[in-house]
Amino acid sequence: MKIIRSQNEIMSYCNELKLKTSFVPTMGSLHDGHIRLLEEGKKYGNYLISSLFINPLQFNNQEDLANYPKNYNEDIKIFEKYDVDLLYFPDEKEIINSNLKKINSGNQGKILEGKHRPGHFDGVLTIVNKFFEIIKPNYALFGIKDFQQLCLIYTKLSPLHSTTIIPVETIREPSGLALSSRNKLLNDDQKLTASKIYEGLKLLEKNIKEDPKINCISFLENFYKDYNSLEIEYISLENTSIFDENERFISKLLHNKNRVIMVAAKVGNIRLIDNILIS
């Protein structure tokens, strides 16, 4: 595996590549969800590129940024194990400077997650756009767990680049808890509580099949109220078309799934998100 830290070096290197490239951006602290992205990336291009960069622009809470887990040495071993060809591991000062082109997530970045994390999606899009400019990947892979992020990258950034966005299913612990780097900050009891987020979503999915007119929000509110240590921030049922823009249609990206139920909750002081897609 080749590791590049210099922006000029990686631009020059990628410009000379004559291969189909797939790209998996990460903030490190890798888990099986990231590994699935890397494995899927191997199926699309014949040269796999990943990045390791904790993006300070996407944190509206500085304490959250300070507490974000950092395991660089372990991460590099995982990148090597899963046959990443090139790792971009930049220095923050080289990425975030006065020349950085800011991307505005617009109204779609201010609803749902964006309402609770002001500026978060501006920061995500700004850095992903920067990496797309530098690396120019043919394919880029993103998890469906971060649903709004996936939609915004697809609608706001893919029109600007010759990069095909590939959505990848959420990977879960045996309990159903969606894998996240933040799970490392939960103790066993908290993980059990956190698994109830998806348990409620799956039970709702089953009930929708029996009664398509069920009130999804009320159903989940009633389910979650039995778990006092699960602090629900929001439950939202949306048509995926709220993210459509620039002739990019989200249902097409998601194989005609046209509704999404999104949940954000805190367990202790750890904030977690999850969702299910329904037709």
Image (cartoon, rainbow, N blue to C red):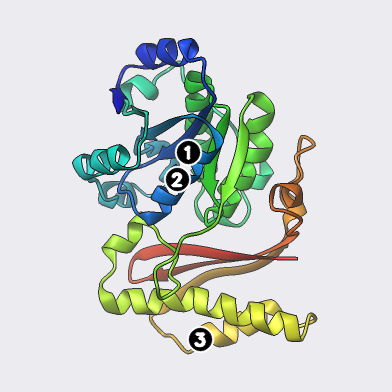
| Image depth: mark 3 or mark 2 in front | 2
Amino acid on which disc 3 is placed? Lys
Pinpoint residue 219: horizontal percent, then vertical percent.
Answer: 64, 84
Upstream in sequence: badge 1 or badge 3: 1
Q: Secondary structure at mark 3?
A: loop
Q: Quadrant of residue 12?
A: top left
In this view, the residue in front, 45 or 152, is: 45
Q: Which mark is residue 42?
A: 1
Q: CA distance from mark 1 to mark 3?
A: 42 Å
Q: Secondary structure at mark 2?
A: helix
In this view, the residue in front, 223 or 62, is: 223
Residue at image x 60%, y 42%?
166
The residue that mark 2 highlights is 39
Q: CA distance from mark 3 to mark 2?
A: 38 Å
> Is residue 153 among what the camera can see?
no
1 and 2 marks in contact (CB < 8 Å): yes
Image side of residue 269 versus residue 245, left or right: left
